[in-house]
Amino acid sequence: MKKKIFIFSHAMEIGGAERALLGLLNSIDYSKYDVDLFLLKHSGELMPLIPKQVNLLSEILQYSAIMKPMVLALKEGQIKVVLGRLCGKLKAKLYDIKHTLNRSAVAIEYSHKHTVKYLSRVNNEHYDIAISFLTPHYIVSEKVNADKKIAWIHTDYSTIELDVKSELAMWSKFDNIVSISDDVTRAFLSTFPSLENKIVKIENILSKDFIEKQADLFNVKNEMTDDSVKLLSIGRFCEAKNFDNVPEIASIIKSKGVDFRWYIIGYGADENLIKSKIAQYNMEDTVIILGKRENPYPYIKACDIYVQPSRYEGKCVAVREAQILKKPVIITNYASSKSQLQDGFDGVIVPMDNQGCANEIVKIIDDKDLQNQLIENTKKTDYTNSKEIEKLYKLIGD
C-alpha cells in the first residue's frame, strides 16, 4: 500500500525555494508514494511544471486570504482572517518597540499565529507524513492530520530578529526540522539550541536534465545582444539579494574600463529602489533589469559569469543552477557562502563591500584561465543532490 505525503507551500512564483520544491516533487518515487500538494494560492509561473503525478488540492478561500491585500480579503468575506492578521500586526509592532528591533520578522510570524485559529482544517485525510516546505508553518502544525510532521528551513536565522519564545513553541510541534545546509543549521541552532535533536540536513534537489532542457528551449540573443562581457544575477528584489548595490558596484567596474553589461532577472518590492540607484550612478546602459522570467535558464546559458551579490542566503538555488550549466560563479562573502561553493574551485567568493566586490569581479573578468578552470571543475561536480531524497524516505520510515 502506498504511503501518503502531504506537502504545503504558498504558491509557485519564480523563486529559489519554489524551484527547490519542484526538484523535490520530481524526485519522489510515485510508485511508492501518493502526494497531495496544498498551496495557499494557485498562482505563479511555475504552476505548469508541477509533476502530473502530484494531486494538487483545491485552493481554499480562507487560506488564500492570508496572502491577499486585506481590503480584497474583506471584500471576499474573510473578516476573521483579516482580524487575525491585524491583531498579529499590532502585537508585533508593540513587541518590536519594546525590544527595539530593526530587522524584525515578528510581524510575519505573529500574523500567522493569530490567523491560524480562524482557519478550518485543510481536509479530513490522514497522512503518513506532512511537510511544511515554506511558511506559514502553523498550517501543517495545526491544521493537518499526520503521523509525522516536518518543516523546512531555507533562511539564515543569524540575519533576522524574532520573538524566540513564540517561534520555539511553533518549531517544537514538528517531529523533524529539515535544514538545507550546515551553515543554515548553525545559524538556526544559535537561536534555538534546544531543537538540535530535531535537525536533519536535506540539501536542495535539482534536476540536471530538466535545467539543461529548459536552457535550450529558446535563444535570448535579442535580449542579451552585444559582444561585451555578460554578467547575470537572479533573485527577488529584496534586501537579502542586495541588488540595490549593483549599480554602484557596476559603476566602479566601468570606471576601470571594462566593457560589460550586468543583467538582472527578478521582481519584488525593491524594484523602484534599484531603478533609482541605476539612475543615480548613470548605469542605464550597463545594468539591465530584465524583470520576471518564467524560464531563466536560457539567460544563464547565455551569460559569461553568474554573480550572486547577496547580503545573506540560505543556500542559493540559482548559484547551483548556474554551476549545472557550467558557468563561472561569483558570490559575495555572506555568512553561508562557504557552504555554497569551494572558493577558487567551482566559484569565487568576493568581499561584501562594493569597492572590494567590484575589484575582484574585474580581476575575474580579466582572468580567462581562472574562468576556464572554474568551468572545468563544474563539469566534475554533481550539483543535483539526487540522493538526498533517500533522507526523506528515511524520515517517513522506509
Image (spheres, grey):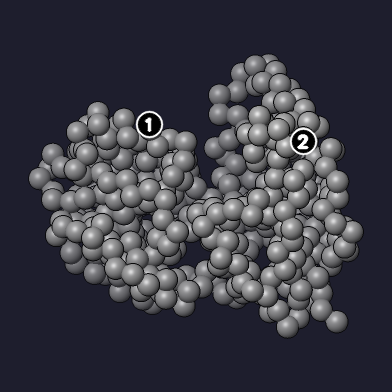
Q: Is residue 274 visible?
A: yes
Dot 1 falls on a residue whose secondary structure is helix
Q: Is residue 381 visible?
A: no
Instruction: Name the kind of residue labelled 2 in the image.
Output: Gln
Instruction: Name the kind of residue labelled 1 in the image.
Output: Leu
Q: Residue at x 78, y 31 (%)?
A: 79
- Percent x, y for residue 246? 31, 40
Dot 2 falls on a residue whose secondary structure is loop
Q: Which one is in front in this view, the residue at disc 2 or the one at disc 1?
A: 2
**Which residue is disc 1 drawn over?**
273
Q: Around disc 2, counting alpha carbons within 10 Å, would you say few (fewer than 14), some (14 to 19), or many (20 or more)?
A: many
- Percent x, y for residue 70? 67, 31
Q: Residue at x 27, y 46 (%)?
A: 288
Q: Which quarter of the rendered picture does the N terminus lie within?
A: bottom right
- Percent x, y for residue 338? 45, 54
Q: CA distance from mark 2 to mark 1?
A: 33 Å
Asked if 106 appears above or below 203 in the picture, the reply is above
Q: Residue at x 74, y 46 (%)?
A: 61
Earlier sequence position, callout 2 versus callout 1: 2
**Which residue is disc 2 drawn over?**
78
Asked if 237 appears above or below 35 in the picture, the reply is above
Q: Quadrant of residue 35?
A: bottom right
Q: Quadrant of residue 222?
A: bottom left
Asked if 268 appears above or below 10 in the picture, the reply is above
Q: Identify which residue, 29 or 75, lies in the foreground.
A: 75
Left or right, residue 203 beside residue 82:
left
Q: Identify which residue, 48 or 134, lies in the foreground.
A: 48
